[in-house]
Image (cartoon, rainbow, N blue to C red):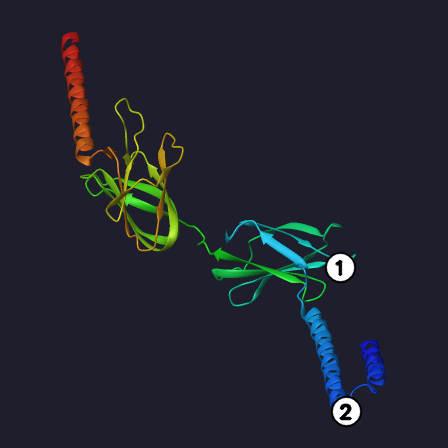
Amino acid sequence: MIKILSLISVEMTLSYNIWQPCVNSKMKFVILYCLAALVTSTFFSTVQHATAESLSPPTGAQITVKIDKDRYNRGDIMIVSGEVKSVVTNVPLTIQILDPDNNLVHVEQILVAVDGRFSLPIKIEGPLWRIPGEYSLVVQYGFKHISAIANFQFEQTDIPTAGVFNVKDLSSGQNFDLNYTITGGRVNSVVIDPQDISLVVQIDSINSGMIHLQVPRLLLDAKKPGNADESFLVFVNDDEITSFREGTSDYGYRYLDIPIVNGDSKIEIIGTTVIPEFENISSFILVFAVGLVTVFTVLSKTRISLKSLNS
């Protein structure tokens, strides 16, 4: 810049010396004014160009990061990968995960590869993962300004609650243990309805979840002609659903997984057979007992008759 001003100054001097004999004082003033304007314009143009260059953003991101999903649950594996543009030997990459309240829930450091790439798995587990919502994964390499962020949703899942209900049929007096596990709510009661050939489960659901039922076949079953298993009919809040799943059943039990959502309160499972009524069993026992008494009476009389003949 100094050189430019010097050259312009020399040019001004030479021009002035050349034109001095030829022009009057008014013309000299005009020429000097034009040269001054040219110098000023050149100066400010140079300054603006230098300022624009100093404020230009970098041509590309110094570090990039991505994750394999946008939603995670407790127990999931998150795959983190990315690339550092300029690698410095033995400088670690720091990975931090912050919850919606900006609390640190995970931190670790790794070394990037020679080509700048990095990849690692992170398991979503531990007591710090408590709040559902949007989490931030922050990667930082060396200086604070060399960083990148990826956001994701953490969906807190309830820990399954297991229990056993003793189901009693009022008409027969028989009792059966029904095992269950539930997430997203709790089980209040389980009763059998012999008239509708159904099992009724009353629940309180506060979140989306699942209820798993181990139904004894002697309590409730569903059969096709020929004694093959038939699918149950399942109703939630009196609406039939088909999204339930039946696991591999065995000789003694049928296994059902039924999804629930917030607000569900009643689950009804309809089969084709329920426990035999106690009246039928009592009648069978009574007939059997009368038969035994009759047999013993006949045998006793026969023995008495044989003794009389022998004497």
Q: Is residue 77 above or below residue 289?
A: below
Which residue lies most toward the front here? Answer: 22
Residue 73 in view in this figure: no
What residue lies at 62% left-to-right and 60% top-to-bottom? 148
Q: Where residue 56 sits: x, y (%)?
A: 67, 67
Q: Nearer the viewer, residue 193 or 22?
A: 22
How far is mark 1 from mark 2, CA to CA?
71 Å
Q: Nearer the viewer, residue 171 or 138?
A: 138
Q: Where residue 205 sits: x, y (%)?
A: 34, 54
**Residues at marks 1 and 2 touching, judged by CB atoms closer than 8 Å:** no
The residue mark sitting in front, 1 or 2, is 2
Q: Is residue 62 left or right of residue 9?
A: left
Q: Secondary structure at mark 2?
A: helix
Q: Is residue 163 above or below residue 51?
A: above
Say what amino acid the circle numbered 1 marks: Val
Give the mark nearer the N terminus: 1 vs 2.
Answer: 2
Residue 157 in view in this figure: yes
Q: Residues within 10 Å of mark 2 (few under 14, many from 20)?
A: few
What residue lies at 28% left-to-right and 52% top-to-bottom? 265
Q: Nearer the viewer, residue 130 or 81?
A: 81
Q: Which residue is mark 1?
A: 91
